[in-house]
Amino acid sequence: MDNAVTAKKKWWSGGSSPFNVSYGKLMMWYFLISDAFTFGALLIAYGTQRFMAEAWPDPNVVFHSFPFMGHADMPLVFVSLMTFILIMSSVTMVLAVNAGHYMDRKSVVKWLSLTIIGGIMFLSCQAWEWMHLHEIGAWWGSNPFPNADGTAAISTNFVDFFFTITGFHGLHVTSGVVLNIIVLINVLKGTYEHRGHYEMVEKVGLYWHFVDLVWVFVFTCFYLL
Amino acid sequence: MAHTHNAADRQASIKKIWKTFWILLGITVVEVGMAFVHLELGWPSRMLLNALFIILTVAKAYYIVSEFMHLGHEIKNLVWTVLMPLTLFIWFIIAFLADGDSWKNMRRNAPSAPLPAEKVAPAHGGGNHH
């Protein structure tokens, strides 16, 4: 694509997209911008509440468990694994997009399948984390965690925002997995082979990377800061 | 969109994808590592650590958007139409966090009932400068 772009080209004089991308990809970008503002609003509301609070729970105490490890104190380890899974699935997605550029159907099927598996693994991890937190008494409106400075919790803001934002992100991952499965079925049916390009893989790829991008911010805001 | 690709191009692009993966993984390992160092040694300070986390998060976001979402290889028109609206976040974040902090100070000075703002402001020297 790059070699078709010359500095002298008049992008706004009509005849071609001034953005040099197809309509579908441009609209996906616009959707992602609006979605970024939705997530941004949620995370900034969380930040505002945190700045308003005199004290706040310590994430290293709240998130210290790992499946099948009993009461072992392992802060951050499980969420690091979840982050790794999601980054990995982003890589397999971009490899599927890359294979699509070369009309390599077999590779697209392989990488897209691995992306779907990665997404399901991430969702399973999140389901375990939610169940674990629920078991120890955390839920919307129920905050069992003392503040980092040792004082008792006086509000449920921490758990409310945690479940709302990770839940909203999990919903995005779920719809991403569904979209990936639909596209995979079309790849297997030969729809894109017939169409002459695999652009649909690129579009769901953009969405999938965005979901990974949001997780980067959720990870920082809830688990690190 | 005609593609004039060959096997060598393909190998190069795949290599770049994996390079980006290692960068992202490396940054995450550094973040988690720093969190553990802080837990063990109490160093660096919370403030310094948070600044580091935010810088590293923005760096990760840059690599995901630029390489994985390919925005770094699109033409300027598209790059700007995506990034310009997002600059609103700069003020969005500053304004809301400052507001939260200001509320905390107001409530601290009036534990039982909220006071009018003009009575609270002098108590901590120009409260609207946070």
Image: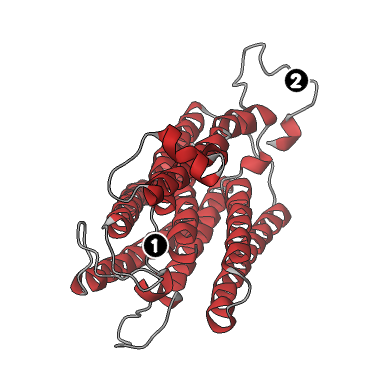
Identify which amino acid the numbered label 1 is placed on: Ala
For the residue pair A81 and A90, the one nearer the viewer reads as A81
Residue A55, which numbered label? 1
Q: Position of residue B117 (x, y in %)?
A: 42, 34
Q: Position of residue A35 (x, y in %)?
A: 41, 38
Give the colouring mode of the picture.
secondary structure
Is the residue A6 above or below the residue B67 in the image? above
Horizontal placement of A5 versus A185: left or right? right
Residue under the point 24% across and 69% down: A144
Horizontal placement of A71 versus B127: left or right? left
Looking at the image, can residue B93 be seen?
Answer: no
Estimate the spatial distance between the alpha carbons at disc 2 and disc 1, rounded to whole Å.
Answer: 57 Å
Q: Residues within 10 Å of mark 2 (few under 14, many from 20)?
A: few
Horizontal placement of B51 versus A109: left or right? right
Q: Position of residue B86 (x, y in %)?
A: 55, 35
Residue, far top = A13
Q: In the rendered image, which residue does mark 2 sit on?
A: A9
Residue under the point 34% across and 49% down: A172
Residue under the point 19% across and 73% down: A135
For the residue pair A118 and A81, the one nearer the viewer reads as A81
Identify which amino acid the numbered label 2 is placed on: Lys
